[in-house]
Image (cartoon, helix red, strand yellow):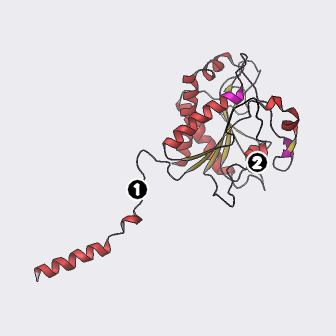
Amino acid sequence: MLRRAAVVLLLGCLLCAPPASSVVEVPASTPLAGRVVVIDPGHQLGNHNFPRRIRRPVPAGGFTKPCNTTGTATDGGYPEATFAWQVSRLVAARLRELGATVRLTRQSNRQDRWGPCVDERGRAGNATSSRPAADLKLSVHADGSYAAGARGFHVIAPPDRAPWTADIHRPSMRLATSVKAGLLSQRFGVATYTAGGDGIDVRSDLGTLNLSDVPTVMVELGNMRSASEARVMTSPSGRARYARGLVSGVRRFLD
């Protein structure tokens, strides 16, 4: 009798337990597994070699803008396109280590390449017939202000503007706050030359933001015309700090 009761109890426990296939565990080393992040390295190194192509007007969210621009550079000639590319690749590599799927809007940094245009960049994270929407899009840039003493980063988010960005405004603002916190954690200061002075700006004139259906921000990581910031941007250790700040911001938002 005792043996029969034990068998019944054992069978009951097996029937109550969930099948092993229904238990999903995310390894501690891959906390971003299943997440999709689009990284948009600003400009392209060869844009200046294709003036007619980058001046071509494209949709930008209720108006048109030039396809792209050449970007800025340090006084020593280090291009924004190269800086954005190098930092973006560091960010992408780390996010992939953490388990995320990362897509870049351009795959090279070359003098014989141009674009892609801002409308293509703007739609880069959107859902298509072949793949779902990304969790977020991060557009990486640097500024070129000649204002006296201009330095520091600022994060640009889309406004609450129907029918273009009203649906992504609030999560994009949360993403902007997270990216700001990530950069502050790496001891970068907010911009001294933008309106508000809090490191977050809202703009309605950027196709990269206006055409997005997913939370998105553009970050100007610093002023390339500032001698002190140029030294950081042109050093591998400085670019690694920027990348760590951006990864931290992405993780804060996704967590």
- Pointer 2: what residue? 210
Query: In the visual, does 2 lie left or right of 112?
Result: left
Vertical placement of 195 versus 255: above or below?
above
Amino acid under label 2?
Asn
Query: In the visual, does 227 lie left or right of 63?
Result: left
Dot 1: element: loop
Distance CA(mark 1)–CA(mark 2): 37 Å
The quarter of the displayed image where residue 193 is located: top right
Label drawn at residue 25:
1
Dominant SS in magenta: loop
The crowd level at tag 1 (other Cα within 10 Å; few <14, some 14-19, many 20+) is few
User: Which residue sits at x=78%, y=36%?
Assistant: 114
Reply yes or no: does residue 74 show up in magenta.
yes
Query: In the visual, does 225 lie left or right of 245?
Result: right
- Residue 221 seen from this side: no
Vertical placement of 6 versus 252: above or below?
below
Query: In the visual, does 43 lie left or right of 1?
Result: right
